[in-house]
Amino acid sequence: MANKPQVPGLLKGLGVTAKTMAQTLKPKKFGGGAATVQYPHEKETPPIRARGVIALREDNCTACMLCARSCPDWCIYIEGHKELAPPRRAGGAPRKVNKLDRFDIDYALCMYCGICVEVCPFDALFWSPEYEYSEPKIADLLHDKIKLGEWMETVPEAPELEAGAEKKKGK
Amino acid sequence: MNLAVTIPYWGQSLLRVLGGTVAVLLPAGTIVYLFLFKMMSFMQSRLGPMEAGPYGSMQLFAEVGKWLQKEDITPARADKRVFRAAPLIVLVSTFLLVAVVPFGPDAYFTQFDAGIFYMLAVSSISTLGILMAGWSSANKYSLLGGLRAAGQLIAYELPMVLSVLGVVIQAGTMNLQTIVLKQNSDSIFGFDGLGYPYIATQFVGFLVFMIAVQAELTQTPFDMPIAESELVSGYMTEYSGFRFLIFFIAEFATAGVFALIASVLFLGGWGIPFSWFGWDSVDSIDNWMNVAGPLVMITKMMVLAGIIMWVRFSYPRFREDQLQRFAWKVLIPVSLINIMLTAIFKVAF
Amino acid sequence: MTDIADRQKLSYIAAQAADARLNVELETEGMTLNIGPQHPATHGTLRIIVRLDGEQVIWAEPSAGYMHRGYEKLTEVRTFPQVTALVNRIDWLGSFANEVPFILAAEKLMEIEAPPRAQHIRTILFELSRIANVSLFLGDLGVQLGAVTPVFMAFRDREHVLNLIESVTGGRFHPNFDRIGGLKDDLPAGFITECKQVMKKLRNFCDEMEDLLFGNEIFQSRLRGIGVIPAEVAKQYGLSGANLRASGVDWDLRRDQSLPLAYDKVEWKVWTHPDGDSFARCWIRLQETREATKIVDQLLDTMPAGPVMAKVPRIIKVPEGEAWVSTENPLGEMGYYVVSKGDLGPFRVKIRSASFNNVSIVPWVLRGVYVPDVISILASLYFILGDIDR
């Protein structure tokens, strides 16, 4: 905290900017280059856990409404009906299953908190790091169950955990 | 040897007007692209504009096109005539400045013996334009900015004049062309390999001049009149469309012209040391210097403008009272002492 | 320190006298200047009404509320897990730090404690969000004072920290990672080595800032002796965090209270500065960024093994009761007073956010300063609008 002599302070500032410029102009091969990414031409890969978009595995969903109820801004719309499915074993009674009619997430409202993915007891919802789904019209941000199902392809495997972690079951 | 002999007077005038426009706009464009777009970006570890043209070199044209499309808004309560005229006055001062700058042995727009005097007088016209802009905008931020600008530009006019006086004393003339010739034909202690650029003896004057230029241009350590974080944009707050563009051009064109003047006064201008080619007077200079001269000049200008911009991107700004104190208590005494020493040495040797 | 305080007092008196004299003798009129709600220097929509005599401020008043989002009311109709997603948005630059005191308050009511590994990771993320927040402050400080380059450097290096936070929590700005009884998930593999590299980069960034800004004479002349807040005044106005420590009060909630966080397991220093001026406030924050990188480094070395979640019921019902927990957030003391009636959600939550108290000193500290100093003082007080208005 000693008072530095008069000139060095000003010159040091020039030095820092000059150094940064040299770093930016240095070819990429030698560890230089800008800190920025020229977006449409090159893309950064988000980390595995990144909360980009929610994917739906429709077969697992039982329309239990847990996600819709736990959503803090109520952006999940679910409609379902009960259906009789063929019995598991021959001769058994037909089972009642919940069939999904409508599963919409309004990404214009969603705040990406991830509570729905967490509360889902049947592993039907997953996070995908995909982020390029902006739309010119805000109404198009309402993704229906077909579109949400398409995101399933982009869902990565859960990452390895750091040393010392207890393995968790499930996702 | 004079190029213009065969051209009628109106042709000469037309050429001069065209040349003046090029001499103002070309450096301004180059400075904006090279330093504002690229160097600043590199210093902030980013690449700057990359999409328009190769390495974003057409970005400036895109920007100009954008500004020209925008609506030309005049605030309802503004003093309309003054408001509209202000940017033009600022730009006019730049054009008047470039008129006396020599670019080569014959490549100049005009030259007369009171060149420096004229240059210093004309450069203060922009103050008037800025004050007009600040006052007529009917905006408190503009008013504060305009008043700050007026105070600052007047304060820094003095050290600028005084620092130039050292050169004038040493050269014994106020003609810019003669100053260039002297610098390139003289020798330092008998060694004439470098000519005699006045930066060697007038280094203090050069520093004071560059600092004063920085302040005259309201570039960063002295950009209190614009001060975008407190006064939004100072006197330019209410301007939009092509009037803002004119302010913008004037800012960088003036930076270029002042860098030209500094290179004339302290770095030997368009010339290269005459001893290299065995020239001994104006008439013996080869004609190709009329082409090479401007290139030499622009190289020197770019170095100086680069320093101006480098400082601009690295430093925070002074407070209004601090920069006034700096002008009156540091720069003016220093340049006065410089004048005295120069005069003593001039008489002694 | 005292003579700076005296000078401040004298200039205040002189300003008042000048004001009175001018108004009586010359009948000049001051100018009222609205700095904000839309103004580049207010980090959002804070409005500061100042009356000017020339360029001197004779009266100033902050007017908050342009971005009031009603979080205290919103929490009453949300369940406990949902609240963390909301409170992320209070101080949006250091959002993980907002979750911690709320979760701690809820845990206090439920009488559970997170496992040691969870406490460690919580502290790491807490400090990472502090670094993300304060490093941006350092850059923004440059912009407020007219230097354009520091802010880009701050964004460049904050990006690394945000990437770290994202790789752990999945969210860059709104992690929503803290859970009652622990954390949502464990660290991903490779985090520790990556984090150490980033901490090195951040220390390098601090050095750069010191060269580019803090060592710069112009910067020092702009901030030294400006906006002096003596310790007693700071306490009276309820300042906290770096603003209080810059006035010479040795007070840091990370050290002074025992919460289930891992601060007692590492060696670190609470920085104070005797001056209380704008420069001190900025300097303290620079040192705290450095200190935070050291804390993170040490915590990474001493990471215990084990689970990250205590045993909690799937549907969380917090027993009846009241709890107050406050922590040392990037901006200062942030606390939650949680009242529960045994339901799924809280009955009432009172949020004590640091910035609201920090800006309350604005009328006092702005008296008699010049317009350019208004900006530098506001910048050095460092508030975030979400933290003022909630």
Image (tube, rainbow, N blue to C red):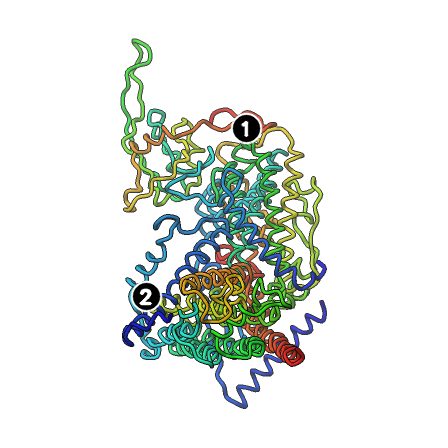
Which chain letter matches label 1? A
Q: Tag on residue C18?
A: none
The one of B74 and B6 positioned closer to us in this rendering: B6
Q: Which residue is mark 2?
A: B241
Give the quarter of the image for residue B251.
bottom left
Cα–Cα gap, marks 2 and 1: 56 Å
In the figure, B289 relative to B38: above or below?
below
Element at badge 2? helix
**Dot 1 amino acid type:** Leu
**In front of the other: A80 or B189:** B189
Q: Is residue C31 shown to the viewer in this render?
A: yes
Is C363 on the left-hand or right-hand side of A64? right
Using the image as rendered, state which of residue C228 and residue B296 is in the foreground.
B296
> Residue at coordinates 50% horizontally, 24% vertically from top-left?
A169
Q: Residue at x 33, y 61 (%)?
A: B64
Residue found at the far bottom of this picture: C25
In the rendering, at what x and y percent does residue B214 appear?
Answer: 52, 68
* Residue at far top of view: A90
Q: Cβ–Cβ below 8 Å for labels 2 and 1?
A: no
Q: Which residue is mark 1?
A: A161
Query: Quick check: C336 left or right of A60?
Result: right
Which amino acid is tagged 2?
Gly
Question: Residue C62's spot in the image, x, y percent?
Answer: 51, 67
Q: Chain for mark 2?
A: B
